[in-house]
Image (spheres, rainbow, N blue to C red):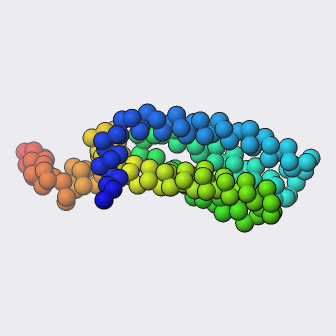
Amino acid sequence: MFDLRRTVAAHGPALRRALPIAFSAAGFLLMPWIVVLAMDVRGHFGARNLSNSWVWLDVMEVSALFLLAALVRRRHRATSPVASATAVLLGLDAFFDLWSAHRGSAYELAQLLAYFAELPSAVVLAALSWYSLAWAADPARGTRAHEEHDPRRRPGSQQDPGARESLRRQERLGDQ
């Protein structure tokens, strides 16, 4: 059976180099599409109509892809939620493209983009979201800021292993 975690672990460094490039390339490739959509609004840009929502949805996708490229490059702990949100954006885009396309070539183009670009990308992003959860949970690779805010590690805390002894020493020194 296919074990995603073992496969990704074996090819992790190569994937971490390739994914930011792929996400940036996808963002750059979407930019001309945004211009085409914005030109299709036909002078009603800014007015309340459905065409504007497509433009802004794609702008959010491009922004999320560029942000995700930067986060993956750094193995940042925010990668998982951003990857999840981007997967949802791509899934919604595919759904509404298919739902709103007219018959004929527009519907065929919507199917092509949905089945071969948006939905596979959403699946990759969902897998990245799951895989990158370990980046947030790994205290050795990040800063030590998590320790400052962890109540179990504060001196005097009931759960700190040396807290009781430390408090006893402080009390003894204070009594003298």
Report x, y in % for residue 9: 31, 44
* Closer-to-camera residue (131/151): 131
161, above or below 100, in the image: above
Residue located at (85% from left, 58% from top): 48
x 59%, y 45%: residue: 64
Quadrant of the frame with the C terminus: top left
Q: Residue at x 57, y 36 (%)?
A: 24
Foreground: 175 or 17? Answer: 17
| Image coords of residue 43 (percent x, y) | 92, 47
Q: Position of residue 91 (x, y in %)?
A: 60, 59
Where the N terminus falls, by quadrant? bottom left
Q: Is residue 17 left or right of residue 10?
A: right
The percent coordinates of residue 130 (x first, y second) are 41, 55
Is 129 in front, or is 76?
A: 129
> How many circles with numbers are drawn on the protein?
0
Whether residue 94 appears in this view of the structure is yes
In the image, is residue 22 above or below residue 113? Answer: above
Residue at (32% x, 55% y) in the render: 3
Quarter-wise, where is residue 90 in the image? Answer: bottom right
Image side of residue 127 versus residue 44, left or right: left
Q: Among all residues in the image, which is located at the extreme bottom?
A: 99
